[in-house]
Amino acid sequence: MDSLRIEFFFDLSEIEHQALFKAFQYPWEVLAAIGDYLNNQTLGKIDVDIPEGAFLDNPELISIGEGTVVEPGAYIKGPCIIGKNNSIRHGAYIRGNVLVGDNCIVGHTTEAKNTIFLNGAQAGHFAYLGDSILGVKSNVGAGTKFANLKLDCKEVVIHANGETINTQLRKFGAILGDYVQIGCNAVTNPGTIIGPHSRCYPCLNFGGVIPPKSIVKPEQKYKVMALDEAHT
């Protein structure tokens, strides 16, 4: 399963927290280790001014790097590390066990939980990102949701290259490789894995393993008719 190894999805050469990834072979294995990794770091160093109206829950478990802007109305719960030069916008909800690299955007009413933003990752508007990893300079369009729990609440299983892999995770959202772009209002099924440099059209519901440099687009039809014809 070499095509699912961590190095297949992410260039970690400029990532500060490489150690979290190097302990594992596959990216979904990292998800279960985020909390322990954060709890073993020296937290509580906040190098920016926090404006009135922004709320830090357990600030002793939160670190925020210089140059990051936290807007009023943002809610950040520890443990959490937010790197340098990020934008944490009004209404952002960081629920804990979140690791944000540098130059990222956690946007208005975007909710993140047990999730990693690698450098330059952006989720600018109205997204739900649970138990997921966003690769370097990946972008999630407005309204995107990463579903992270199956309806039957069973462990998430991956089917790839003729093999079936039980991730042993009940909650597993999505893995986005570097430079992946997802259009607005897309919904990914639990355990979606998208290879680097892929693009996904808006308003999709999809899942599975998407190869690198792919385009995911819907097969849908619609009809345009004259107004008079539509009412006959």
Image (cartoon, rainbow, N blue to C red):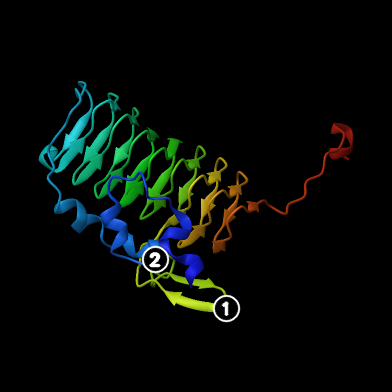
Question: Mark 2 sits on what residue?
Answer: 26
Q: Position of residue 132 (x, y in %)?
A: 39, 54
The residue carrying pointer 1 sits among few (fewer than 14), some (14 to 19) or many (20 or more) residues within 10 Å by Cα, namely: few
Amino acid carrying label 2: it is Tyr
The residue carrying pointer 2 sits among few (fewer than 14), some (14 to 19) or many (20 or more) residues within 10 Å by Cα, namely: many
State which mark lies toward you, 2 or 1: 2
Number of marks? 2
Question: Mark 1 sits on what residue?
Answer: 162
Residue found at x 38% / y 35%: 104
Q: Is residue 4 visible?
A: yes
Q: Position of residue 47 (x, y in %)?
A: 18, 28
Q: Is residue 21 left or right of residue 66?
A: right
Callout 2 touching callout 1 (CB < 8 Å): no
Choose the circle earlier in sequence order: 2 or 1.
2
Residue found at x 37% / y 33%: 103
Residue found at x 83% / y 39%: 224
Residue found at x 49% / y 40%: 139
Please determine whether, in this image, residue 65 is positioned above or below residue 145: above
Q: Secondary structure at mark 1?
A: loop
Q: Position of residue 53 (x, y in %)?
A: 22, 24
Please determine whether, in this image, residue 18 is positioned above or below residue 140: below
Q: Is residue 162 left or right of residue 57?
A: right
